[in-house]
Image (cartoon, rainbow, N blue to C red):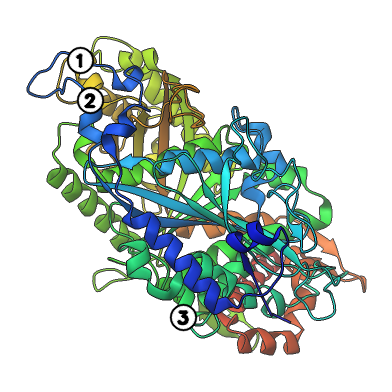
């Protein structure tokens, strides 16, 4: 069922045919040597400077004690390549065609992967050059969008998304190996046609970036008439990700498992892009069931925690747009899925340093989301790797890190259980059959929502003028539109409107963290600026950015303490601007005069599960035998009565997820019966 034989690109070039005649072990050796060659490669910085034009962020400036004449020398020096991290994209809602309606300069999957590669491959410090890799997990039907698979009896087509020749006669991507197996992985569903997926390296960036697919799916993957999965994920998804050292999966090969420290430095997988859909969640469950895979999750620190990025539609939008039978079932499943990510004991063990993990939720209709999350990831790593060149603030690094650590620890005490605090629970309690009161599991991961806005450079520069109205305009915009749009994914809109009570700030009910059950604990605003720190200091004529005026406005609008509840950071990222076709810095999707404003709000998980489940208690329904029942009955009676399925789930290590589904069902059912007097 799970036999994978694979062939290297070298072999393919010699014979012109794809012939599965190499074993996994030889393949591992091949990948290993390729990777080690790339890491031994020292950047020739003098030759590389010719690819960086002396304009935009890099133009020469009058030298002073804080400004270098040629800013490029602050960022680019003789450096050794280091492989920093791996991004996983599980399921493909992050990159499905509809996503590109909201993007301005990315029209295809190929553009997105290129952008991610170029932006991430160039996070300099003068001593090292760091890069990341992206691995996409997709299921049946995603082939065309993903750059398409290749049958074993034919080579890549002339218009292949990545492997077609360019004007200079070279494909833009080099194939590292051909692999990744069958079209259908379930026994009996293989249409006798082996399919090879390219795992690729990008040319013409300073350090080649690896990218690969893991593809799995039975024919007929889907649900039966009752809405339950007809195919078992442990039959087809899990073998693709649940690797062991002696029988590695395709995924382990791409992650170069044999020695993580050698191949990753100290990092590993630090970003997981997923949705609440079944492909995403079963992929992650398969990974969590494998000790080998869990070891690949990286050393998240306070500066760059292990982050799970989730796309969700607004609660109200979802309910108003979906069909009657889907309206509430989705809320139960989202509640259980988010609960799984926040409370699962297996996920609790990953995340490095202080087991720092963060689940970030983005609105589905966020414009330019792919570009902004790429920029944000670069900013996170820049703060960690090259602080001096990127942060535009009065605080030096030690002070900044101290504040950051203190703030995160204070927040973690509110949310996660410790010797000082009881911690938040996901679904406080429910009465399970047999009158057994059960407490919900403790939350161990910080939950946040995030939204983006793009500003012009002039708008941004005006915010440094203390007598201008610009700081006020921008702070209002951050709270009224960006924050509200981000919060609608986890909170109903009627909780997010303006407060009209006299004597209180307009948004006090959302931002005041002294309330008994606050919505938000703390707000972080970051400006990502595509220019060099030298140019920035030259233009503002100062060493740091004073954000006093913005803090005052924040306090007026929200009634929150602007010191403990707000963090504002200005980051310069000179490798972000797209400087045109004559430079290496092209394809990043950001113009030089565009600033990204990123608003992240740390939210209270004990308010969120209630928001997801309360709409399910609003209505009652006619059940098939004529009795009246609740939304929970309509969604879950079949599931709750299926003892065999429960035993199978427990046996397959899904007991925690099953328990969350039961808690959601019984809490909602009991509340609705009480409310409607059934």
Quadrant including the C terminus:
bottom right
Q: Position of residue 355 (x, y in %)?
A: 33, 67
Residue 34 position (above or below residue 120): below
Residue 121 position (above or below residue 336): above
> How far is the residue under mark 3 from the one under mark 2?
45 Å
Do the residues bearing badges 1 and 2 touch, measured as CB atoms within 8 Å? yes
Quadrant including the N terminus:
bottom right
What residue sits 69% from the left and 80% below the top? 2
What mark, if any, has residue 61 been given in the picture?
1
Asked if residue 22 lies left or right of residue 422, the reply is right
Residue 370 position (above or below residue 180): above
Q: Nearer the viewer, mark 3 or mark 2?
A: 2
**168 and 585: which one is in front?**
168
Which residue of the protein is positioned furthest toward the right in this rendering?
Answer: 625
Secondary structure under tag 2 reads: loop
- Residue placed under numbered mark 3 in the picture: 291
Asked if residue 254 lies left or right of residue 298, the reply is right
Asked if residue 34 lies left or right of residue 317, the reply is left
Question: Can residue 371 be seen at all in this image of the molecule?
Answer: yes
Asked if residue 526 lies left or right of residue 203, the reply is left
**231 and 361: which one is in front?**
231
Q: Earlier in the sequence, mark 3 or mark 1?
A: 1
Callout 3 crowding tier (Cα within 10 Å): few <14, some 14–19, many ≥20: few
- Residue placed under numbered mark 2 in the picture: 71
Callout 2 crowding tier (Cα within 10 Å): few <14, some 14–19, many ≥20: many
What residue sits 59% from the left and 75% below the top? 657
Question: Can residue 514 be seen at all in this image of the molecule?
Answer: no
> Which quadrant of the figure has residue 570?
top left
Residue 379 position (above or below residue 341): above
Q: Position of residue 269 (x, y in %)?
A: 43, 61
């Amino acid at each position: 069922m799970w036999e994978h034989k694979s062939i290297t690109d070298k072999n393919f070039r010699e014979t012109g045919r794809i012939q599965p005649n190499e074993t996994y072990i030889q393949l591992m050796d091949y990948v290993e040597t390729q990777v080690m060659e790339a890491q031994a490669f020292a950047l020739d910085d003098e030759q590389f400077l010719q690819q960086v034009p002396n304009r935009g962020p890099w133009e020469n400036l009058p030298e002073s004690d804080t400004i270098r004449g040629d800013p490029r020398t602050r960022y680019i020096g003789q450096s050794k390549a280091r492989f920093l991290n791996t991004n996983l994209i599980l399921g493909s809602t992050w990159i499905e065609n509809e996503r590109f309606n909201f993007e301005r300069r990315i029209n295809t999957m190929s553009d997105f992967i290129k952008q991610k590669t170029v932006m991430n491959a160039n996070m300099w410090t003068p001593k090292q050059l760091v890069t990341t890799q992206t691995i996409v997990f997709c299921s049946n039907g995603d082939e065309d969008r993903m750059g398409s698979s290749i049958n074993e009896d034919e080579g890549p087509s002339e218009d292949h998304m990545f492997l077609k020749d360019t004007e200079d006669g070279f494909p833009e991507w080099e194939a590292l190996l051909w692999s990744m197996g069958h079209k259908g992985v379930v026994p009996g569903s293989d249409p006798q046609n082996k399919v090879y997926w390219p795992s690729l390296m990008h040319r013409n960036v300073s350090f080649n970036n690896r990218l690969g697919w893991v593809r799995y799916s039975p024919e007929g993957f889907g649900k039966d008439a009752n809405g339950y999965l007809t195919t078992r994920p442990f039959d087809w998804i899990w073998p693709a990700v649940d690797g062991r050292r002696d029988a590695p999966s395709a995924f382990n090969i791409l992650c170069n498992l044999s020695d993580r420290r050698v191949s990753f430095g100290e990092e590993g997988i630090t970003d997981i892009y997923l949705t609440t859909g079944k492909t995403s969640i079963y992929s992650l469950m398969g990974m969590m069931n494998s000790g080998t895979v869990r070891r690949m999750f990286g050393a998240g620190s306070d500066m760059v925690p292990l982050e799970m990025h989730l796309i969700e539609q607004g609660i109200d939008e979802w309910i108003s747009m979906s069909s009657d039978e889907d309206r509430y079932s989705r809320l139960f499943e989202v509640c259980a899925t988010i609960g799984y990510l926040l409370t699962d004991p297996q996920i609790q063990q990953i995340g490095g340093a202080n087991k720092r993990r963060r689940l970030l939720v983005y609105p589905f209709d966020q414009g330019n989301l792919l570009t902004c999350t790429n920029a944000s990831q670069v900013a996170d790593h820049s703060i960690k790797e090259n602080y001096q060149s990127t942060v535009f603030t009065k605080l030096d690094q030690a002070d900044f890190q101290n504040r950051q650590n203190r703030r995160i620890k204070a927040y973690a005490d509110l949310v996660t259980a410790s010797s000082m605090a009881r911690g938040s629970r996901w679904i406080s309690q429910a009465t399970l059959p047999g009158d057994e009161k059960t407490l919900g599991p403790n939350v161990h991961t910080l939950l946040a929502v995030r939204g983006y806005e793009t500003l012009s450079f002039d708008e941004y520069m005006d915010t440094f003028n203390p007598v201008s109205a610009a700081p006020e305009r921008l702070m209002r915009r951050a709270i009224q539109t960006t924050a509200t749009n981000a919060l609608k994914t986890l909170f109903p809109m009627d909780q997010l409107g303006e407060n009209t009570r006299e004597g209180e700030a307009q948004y006090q009910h959302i931002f005041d963290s002294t309330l008994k059950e606050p919505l938000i604990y703390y707000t972080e605003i970051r400006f990502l600026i595509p220019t060099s720190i030298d140019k920035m200091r030259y233009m503002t004529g100062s060493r740091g950015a004073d954000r006093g005026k913005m803090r005052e406005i924040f306090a007026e609008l929200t009634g929150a303490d602007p010191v403990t509840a707000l963090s504002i950071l200005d980051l310069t990222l000179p490798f972000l601007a797209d400087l045109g076709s004559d430079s290496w810095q092209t394809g990043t999707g950001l113009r030089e005069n565009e600033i990204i404003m990123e608003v992240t709000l740390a939210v209270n998980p004990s308010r969120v599960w209630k928001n997801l489940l309360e709409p399910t208690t609003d209505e009652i329904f006619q059940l098939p035998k004529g009795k009246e029942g609740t939304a929970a009955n309509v969604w879950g009676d079949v599931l709750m009565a299926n003892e065999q399925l429960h035993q199978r789930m427990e046996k397959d290590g899904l007991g925690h997820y099953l328990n969350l589904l039961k808690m959601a069902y019984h809490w909602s059912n009991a509340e609705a019966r009480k409310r409607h007097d059934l």
